[in-house]
Image (spheres, coloured by chain):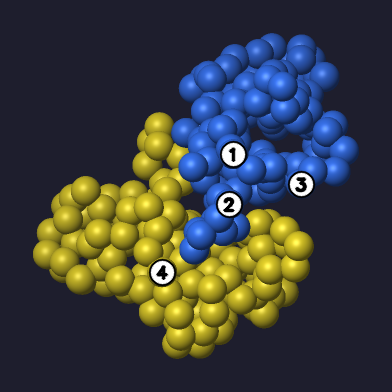
Chain colours: A yellow, B blue
Amino acid sequence: NAGVTQTPKFRVLKTGQSMTLLCAQDMNHEYMYWYRQDPGMGLRLIHYSVGEGTTAKGEVPDGYNVSRLKKQNFLLGLESAAPSQTSVYFCASSPRDSGRARETQYFGPGTRLLVL
Amino acid sequence: AQSVTQLDSHVSVSEGTPVLLRCNYSSSYSPSLFWYVQHPNKGLQLLLKYTSAATLVKGINGFEAEFKKSETSFHLTKPSAHMSDAAEYFCVVSARGGGSQGNLIFGKGTKLSVKP
């Protein structure tokens, strides 16, 4: 099993450009998440999904959109990139809630995004 | 609302000496607490988790943490530091209640340096 994978690993954008980050998991997990990591800030939740076709806002959703058309994939879109979106983006997934099983999240390797 | 506070942004120890990374939490519910580790330019790896079973939790690589309700603390310790322990460590609490049930809330991180 590959676990959680993210594409691309690194990307440079110019202000105003758009892009989509892809997260894929092969663990048949129901829940998926997108975080951003900035120095001294820890990880902050952008959006999450509790199942195919459903998404919800996290702590810092502005400037991002997401889609979960397939259970194994979770896409994060930036419609008009801004320098403030320069960050490292992590995707994670977790299994269907069974007791507290949902709370154990499995993380991808991250995508480094630089917006000039 | 739940939150975690990591009391030190940087900790430096010598190889072979004990490690103590401090974390206080705030939660009106019985919390689930986690420690994650992130090595340079890598993703996040779960070290250990507390989910209301034994208050002393043993994790991977010789780390352990003790849940102390009276002190609202969940400090991470290791008896003897190794060079490979140099990384950033995140204390995490699971959200309770409402639509964010099960989402993770990260502390800002503690960078551990290990001197030879």
Residue at the extreme left: A16
Packing grade of label 3 (10 A; few <14, some 14-19, many >=20) is some
Task: Give the residue at x 13% y 59%.
Answer: A15
Is disc 4 in contact with disc 2, using a CB cutoff of under 8 Å?
no
Dot label at residue B51: 3
Is disc 3 in contact with disc 1, using a CB cutoff of under 8 Å?
no
Query: SS class of the residue under badge 1?
Result: loop
Of the numbered discs 1 and 2, the one sitting upstream in the chain is 1
- Coordinates of residue A36 in the picture (x, y in percent): 40, 52
Q: Looking at numbered disc 3 in the image, what kind of residue is underneath it? A: Thr
Return the residue nearer the eye: B43 or B15. Answer: B43
- Coordinates of residue A30 in the picture (x, y in percent): 61, 76
Q: Looking at numbered disc 4 in the image, what kind of residue is underneath it? A: Ala
Residue identified by numbered label 2: B96
Return the residue nearer the eye: A19 or B69. Answer: B69
Q: Looking at numbered disc 2 in the image, what kind of residue is underneath it? A: Arg
Do discs 1 and 2 belong to a common subunit? yes
Is disc 1 in contact with disc 2, using a CB cutoff of under 8 Å?
yes
Residue identified by numbered label 1: B28
Q: Quadrant of residue B26?
A: top right
Packing grade of label 4 (10 A; few <14, some 14-19, many >=20) is some
**CA distance for labels 3 and 1:** 15 Å
